Amino acid sequence: MRSKLLASAVAASALAGGATFGVTGIAGAQSGDDRPPAEAGRPGGHRPKLDAAAQALNLSVGDLRSKLRDGKTLAQVAADQNVDKQKVIDAMVADATAHID
């Protein structure tokens, strides 16, 4: 149960907080390393996958990643795609839970 709450909190904060969840920061993008600066240089960095969110948004992962790199939040992309942000949250929580359990 605790892991499901954690997964829910992470997904919700990505949508509500305006984070570019799973997308590199500007420094990471400029360095050519496809991971956030805190994980750059470390083998195998851990970041959430965007597959579930992209599927819920009817986008390819590449298209979603591009929109996020352009500064949009997941909530903004959901609104642009006419998808309820709760659908994206539910998809990400289900995906994260499947990888935890």
Image: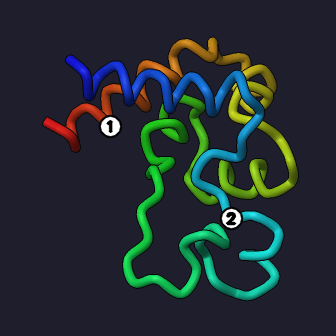
Q: Secondary structure at mark 2?
A: loop
- Which residue: 65% across, 17% down? 83
User: For the point 72% across and 40% down, which residue is it?
Assistant: 19
Q: Position of residue 48 (x, y in %)?
A: 45, 50
* Residue 95 image-quadrant placement: top left
Type of amino acid at the residue the image marks with label 2: Thr
Q: Is residue 80 above or below residue 36?
A: above
| Above or below, comparing residue 19 to residue 13 in the picture | below
Instruction: Say how the picture is coloured.
Output: rainbow
- Can you identify the residue that label 1 sits on? 96
Q: Is residue 39 above or below residue 82?
A: below
- Badge 2 crowding class, 10 Å Cα cut-off, few under 14, some 14 to 19, many 20 or more, is many
- Measured from the top left, where is residue 29 in percent x and y? 76, 76
Where is residue 34? Give x, y as percent.
61, 76
Residue 43's tag is none
User: Which residue corresponds to mark 2?
Assistant: 24
Give the residue type at disc 1: Ala
Front residue of 64/34: it is 34
